[in-house]
Amino acid sequence: YNSKQPSDARIEHIQQITPRWLQRFHDVGLSALKPDTRRHRWGVIRSFFAHLQRVGVLDSDPSVSIQRGKSSGEIGHIPFTDAQYKAILENADWYVDERVRNGEREVYCQRMHSFLELLRWTGMDLIDAVQFRPAEQIDADGVLRYTRTKTGASGVIPLQPHMPALLRAVPDVQKSVPGMPFRYRDN
């Protein structure tokens, strides 16, 4: 965006960015993006300028008066359609890793199905899902409460009606950590 400016109008230092320049960047520089992506990117930019003001790099935040724009209401960040996710679950219900022994197929498939559902309906990071403790983290009302490993932030997630029973019924295997159905003792 900056390279399209005449050479005498180019921004070389962050302190040169004015609200007017930033408004033009918002309106023109981000115009090729879809509305929700544009809105998200603008939120990141506003956070960046607010940080620069907090730490004293800037006297004032040039982005403060420029709004993020309205959301389209579409969920554009979901990686799979319903049909694709259904196909993933169907495969999880029969496909097993070649290292799974005979007689363990059903348990492996049930555990994989439950793990995928946990990830889908909670949005947990992998590390939090591996450390999931159903007896401690799901209350009587079907609400999952946990602390995110990466950030320390609390997560409170009302589960879909089918989820509490599904997650409480994950079978243990010989090497799983007691109370943590997706965690193994040796890793």
Image (cartoon, grey):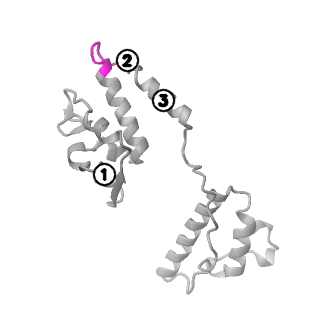
**Residue drawn at x 29%, y 12% as measured from the top left:** 102
Assess disc 2: are there few (<14), some (14-19) or many (≥20) residues with their C-alpha within 10 Å of its C-alpha.
few
Specify the principal SS of the magenta part. loop
Most extreme residue toward the left, as rendered?
178
Is 156 drawn above or below residue 135 in the view shown? below
Residue to which mark 3 is pinned: 88
Residue depicted at 27% across the width and 50% down the height: 141
Q: Secondary structure at mark 2?
A: loop
| Nearer-N-terminus badge (1/3) | 3
- Report x, y in % for residue 166: 31, 35
Does residue 141 appear left or right of residue 8 in this picture? left
The C terminus lies in quadrant: top left
Return the residue at label 2: 98
The amino acid type found where label 3 is placed reads: Ile
Distance (Cα) linking label 1 and label 3: 25 Å
- Viewer-nearest of discs 1 and 2: 1
Residue holding disc 1 = 143
**Residue sitting at the far bottom:** 59
**Secondary-structure class at tag 3:** helix
Instruction: Give the amino acid at mark 1.
Output: Val
Using residue 34 as the reference point, say whether residue 183 is left or right of it: left
Question: Is residue 100 on the magenta stretch?
Answer: yes
Q: Which residues are magenta?
A: 99-106
Asked if 1 appears above or below 55 in the picture, the reply is: above
